[in-house]
Image: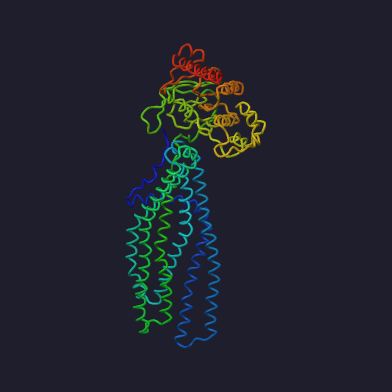
Amino acid sequence: MRGHHAGPAGSFASAPGQLRGRALQALRLLRPLLRRYRWRLTVGLAALIGVDFLQLLVPRFIKRAVDSLSAGTATNPLLARLAGAVVALALVVAGCRFVWRTLILGFSRLVERDIREWLFGHLLTLDRLFFGRHPVGATMALATNDLAAVQLAAGMGVVAAVDAVVMTIAAFCFMLYIHPLLALLTLTPMPFLALTTKVLSARVHQRFHKVQEQFSRMTEFARSTFAFIPLYKAFTQEEAQGARFGKLGEEYVRDNLRLATVQGILFPASGLVGNLSLLIVVVYGGRLTVTGAISTGDFVAFLSYLLMLTWPMMALGWVFNLFQRGVIALERINEVLAARPALPEPVATGPASLAGAIILRNLTFTYPGQGQPALREVSVEFGQGITGIVGRTGAGKSTLCQLIARLYPVADGMLLMGGRDANTLPVAALRERIAYVPQEVTVFSDTIAANIALGNPAASQEAIERVARTAAIHEEILAMPQGYQTRVGEKGVRLSGGQRQRLALARALLLDRPVLIIDDGLAAVDLETEQHIVLALREYLAGRTCLIVSHRLAPLQYADRILVFDNGRLVAAGTHAELLAQNRFYATIYAFQRMEEATGEAGHAAA
């Protein structure tokens, strides 16, 4: 069984080195997007940096105005020119700010869209083993809550980070130009902020990951509740479900508060560092101004640059938080994108002629995590005609159908199609040969015609009606208010169980494929209708292969061959008449079902 699957959510190692490794691997997802939108990013970042440098010129104009006022050389034309320069800078800054907001924030939305499309497309390639381990609600949370975190980090996170770096370096250079020693003294509180950030980084990472996991659990709980709400109502569990959801919500809030406790330290720490630097400038810089080492204008300009430097310090915690959230979300998304279907996909194959029999050779299969095989050493060949499959519950009938439909992997050499090992053929090519009617029928909230034409949307109305007649549902459809344009409601709520199954059968017939598998897909249909359908299938599927799993033996008497399974083994095979004569299990079940039918008919007549 080949293929790789990501580990369960929440399996993050606590070692810093492993955390960094995961983060770097997740960030590689952005490489193709950075190349695709490089011009958008380049122009946007240039506009952002331009805004920062233009803002840094304002204190220089203020310095000239203050110094001229202090020296008594200020004139109205000079002050008007300086004011006009500030207004002109403000207009240019406004234009550049519009450019970077459009381009960089637009980039973040494009990143969100592209990753969502990657995620959705990749999920369509994964198989049942993946979805058996990953709840649908948790996967939905990746495309909503986690992607929102990525979008915010790729947008405002990038803006704030670049803004902080550029503003810090440029403002500090101007401060060095005014007075080097005073500028260096303002950096003395910085080691405290760096140490605080380093200590809290691992805790933020772990706690935010826990928050995301809890949100996934809430999403899955809500999805499953709404999906099966009739069941909860039937068991009067509305209040209990509400209480369970409330408990999940409380845990989510508690996890967020724990995260906020850690994050809450970063912002005050950043503010403390900024205020300590401001105190140093006021005390020491004030003395320098009094002694004439720097002018009053220099002091005012220095304070302006320090305020520009203080904002990046105070925003450091927020920026760090955004990037932590974005990286963790990318890690979670990357786990899904790294998963691979367990079914092997050949790298290269020759011309695939898939016509011919389906052959099983000593097929043994065990579900993951199970100790006992579901099928044991099954060897059989399926050719043209109808093959019935019977057996007790859990005998392996559905497993057999799912393996032939390539829903689970099998070992090499155990499943042959068209004379070739199925593991050497493209999975999609094999599935294109098979129409499959599962036990659990899926009906969409759409029209009857659209449901039947799911696999062939271009099918004509005539073709849709033809398969509906074969499935013995055409007359019932015509009796509905809008006929084939009748909307069936969520999950086909307006249809009976038997109607949903026959609709699914018509959908499979419309595919017009050489192999049809009906996995107990007529269990909700009455016996007479099931017999009618089997007889119709003999004519409709002439020259094709059809497998029908059924618990009722009477309809299968029209099959070309019947296979009897018990405890995962093929224990008997033959026609209906041969099995009645030679297989005690089959004969006993048939007699019991005939007696039930006779009892039911007698009771109906008496009523």
On the image, the x and y values in percent for residue 349 come to 51, 32
On the image, the x and y values in percent for residue 323 come to 42, 56
Q: Is residue 337 visible?
A: no
**Residue 116 position (above or below residue 539):** below
On the image, the x and y values in percent for residue 201 come to 35, 57
**Residue 13 position (above or below residue 605):** below
View extreme (front): residue: 607
View extreme (bottom): residue: 72
**Residue 66 position (above or below residue 563):** below
In the foreground, 84 or 147: 147
In the foreground, 582 or 182: 582
Residue 99: quadrant of the picture? bottom right
| Quarter occupied by the C terminus | top right
| Quarter occupied by the N terminus | top left
How are the colours assigned in the image?
A: rainbow
In the foreground, 72 or 223: 223
Q: Is residue 244 visible?
A: yes
Residue 470: quadrant of the picture? top right
Residue at x 55%, y 78% (from the top left corner): 84
Q: From the viewer's perspective, is 166 left or right of 467?
A: left
**Residue 309 position (above or below residue 594):** below
On the image, the x and y values in percent for residue 284 come to 34, 78
In the foreground, 325 or 590: 590
Q: How many marks overall?
A: 0
